[in-house]
Amino acid sequence: FAFTVSFHIIFPAFSIGLASYLAVLNGLSLLTGQAIWLSLFDYWKKIFAVAFGMGVVSGIVMSYQFGTNWSVFSDKAGPVIGPLMGYEVLSAFFLEAGFLGVMLFGRERVGARLHCLATAMVALGTFMSAFWILSVNSWMQTPAGYGFNEAGQFIVKDWMAVIFNPSFPYRLVHMLLAAYLTTAFVVGAVGGLHLLKARKSGAPNEGARTMFSMAMWMIVCTAPLQIAAGDFHGLNTLEHQPAKIAAMEGHFESHAGAPLILFGLPNADEERVDAKVAIPKLGSLILKHDPEGVVKGLKEWAPEDRPPVTVLFWSFRVMVGIGMAMLGIGLWSLWQRARRRLYDASWLHRAAVLMGPSGFVAVIAGWITTEVGRQPFTVY
């Protein structure tokens, strides 16, 4: 199941951002009438079709595994989880699937305006799909609005509390920004690769310049927002899942003025972090907004109630490290743009190509962080 969900998540993460990018390209084509926007749209729509199809196929496998691998969970939580996942299919997926054919094949048949509307509906469908799925996952992390029946099943007492549970807004924003960043780095990598080829051939490539510029603008705008959203998400997690935060940060002991452990080797058996590199009091400053704030350590929980520390410790650092590298690429591109060398900065283009898959790695690392951090509980 872990393999299935990790394989599946890379496709929605890409298609959410790419659908919005296609909607922007289509809108610009309609507004300006310039051929370059439609050319880029036609280029990326084929890639979107493959990613969308792979997301559907891998998602179907995952839905069967809820019954085969998680039958007790499906029985106990089904009255809450089932309708939410049904809403995702009946609203979001049907909206995407209904307009997808028009978007891919119907421009000459329905006209430019209706084709643009169809593309916007596909983009809206991907957003709605993320809305419902993240509502389901967030409810498992911070359940609300529920009771129990005589059979011991979760039942719904307040649908609004179930859907808009305490962690849902933070997770939704964090995931959507991750999807936009993932797409921006893929688009930027493709643009950077074509710019490098154009540099060798000496022939200008206007399409590559346009997509690279758009990708860099998206990274500049989105990377700082993602870091801020991650901070708010972390504070929400500290409130509702403090054991997860303790494992992410590598804190076994509770103490005031907790350091920020940059690197180290978690030793769950000895309940310590070996060979650590830490900044004094910065952990408390980030988590409590007070350099002397008290941060709980894992020893506050029984060993059987603690999440797996080593996996969580490293997956969190992979995610944060990539996020910082993304911000660096964005600032680098802004500097080169100010120097009017955005399309001539070959080292920036090479870095963009290398960073192309980084969004996927960060998404999987983030998914591991949030899911492993909930263990040993399925509904926290």
Image: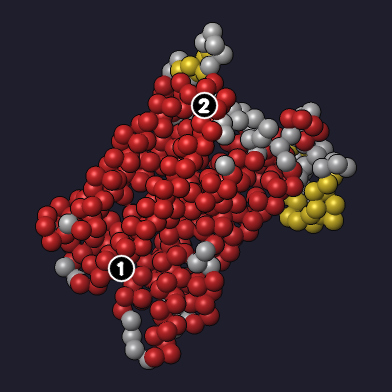
Bin the neighbour count of mark 1 within 10 Å (Cα to Cα): few under 14, some 14-19, many 20 and up.
few
Mark 2 and mark 1 residues within 8 Å of each other at the beta carbon: no
Determine which quarter of the picture holds residue 305.
top right
Which corner quadrant holds the C terminus? top right
Asked if 344 appears above or below 269 in the picture, the reply is below
Residue drawn at x 66%, y 35% as measured from the top left? 375
User: In terms of secondary structure, where does tag 1 sit?
Assistant: helix
Which corner quadrant holds the N terminus? top right
Which residue is more in the foreground, 232 or 18? 18
- Please say whether residue 177 is visible from this viewpoint: no
Depth-wise, is mark 2 or mark 1 nearer the camera? 2
Mark 1 residue type: Tyr
Give coordinates of residue 340: x percent, y percent.
41, 80
Mark 2 residue type: Ser
The residue tagged 1 is 43
Give coordinates of residue 209: x percent, y percent.
36, 76
In this view, the residue farthest toward the front is: 68
- Please say whether residue 36 is visible from this viewpoint: yes
**How far apart in space, not on screen, are marks 2 and 1 (Cα)?**
41 Å
The residue tagged 2 is 74
Which of marks 1 and 2 precedes in the sequence?
Answer: 1
Which residue is more in the foreground, 129 or 352? 129
Residue drawn at x 45%, y 82% as measured from the top left? 196
